[in-house]
Image: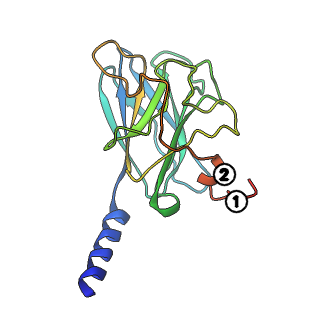
Amino acid sequence: MQFTKLISLLAAAVVATAENTVTFVSQDSFDRTVIFTSNPNYAKLPDTVVPASKNVTVPFPQGWQGNWYAVKKGEPNIPGMLGEVAFNGWNGITYFDVSAIVNPNDKDNVKQMWPADEEEPVSGCVLFPCNFAYYLPDDVQTRATLDTNLFCSLGSRDGSTIDRRSFDFDSSPTFPRDFVVGKWSKKN
């Protein structure tokens, strides 16, 4: 009995101290700046430069919620396709999605998101539009994982990288936005 309790405490400690990260994967020959917007009451994160054809891993605080978009070097800073995440949400689950709600015309910056240690679920598109991104506020497209490390692809592949999704079907569950922010009820 004590052994089981000890194992449970150790597992809880590991989850509580697990670092949240997003690795931004540049798939082309353009440098980009990733610009973060934190939800109210969450830490502000500094902009991050992702060099062409490189990966940059950004740590996030425990429970952080917010989004980001990317801008090519030399281009105007106009919000585009968003990567959105709620780390360590309900039951320790990380919720994420790619959203075209703000600017569906940005088809060459944030592309796809997926858990680092799993093949799926994947949110976003190789080519926009597709069925795996938010286009309207009521779309049910949020993905969920127990992983606290995510990947986010930037730009169009140049043949040297493999996109996470090149098919039109995904059996992984999706969740309504109200579920993610703790407002979901059976009435919804």
Quarter of the figure with residue 114 = top left
Colour scheme of the picture: rainbow
- Disc 2 crowd rating (10 Å Cα; few below 14, some 14-19, many 20+) is few
Quarter of the figure with residue 19 = bottom left
Amino acid type indicated by mark 2:
Asp
Amino acid type indicated by mark 1:
Ser
Q: Secondary structure at mark 1?
A: loop
Residue located 44% across and 23% down the image: 167
In the rendered image of this protein, does residue 28 appear above or below residue 19? above
- Disc 1 crowd rating (10 Å Cα; few below 14, some 14-19, many 20+) is few
Q: Pinpoint residue 81: horizontal percent, then vertical percent.
A: 56, 27
Q: CA distance from mark 1 to mark 2?
A: 8 Å
Q: Pinpoint residue 109: horizontal percent, then vertical percent.
A: 48, 22
Q: Pinpoint residue 22: horizontal percent, then vertical percent.
A: 39, 41
Relative horizontal placement of residue 153, taking residue 90 as reference (left or right) = left
Q: Residue furthest left?
A: 3
**Mark 1 and mark 2 residues within 8 Å of each other at the beta carbon:** yes
Q: Which mark is residue 178?
A: 2
The quadrant of the rendering that contains the N terminus is bottom left
Relative horizontal placement of residue 12, taking residue 110 as reference (left or right) = left
For disc 1, the marked residue is 185
In the rendered image of this protein, does residue 7 appear above or below residue 37? below
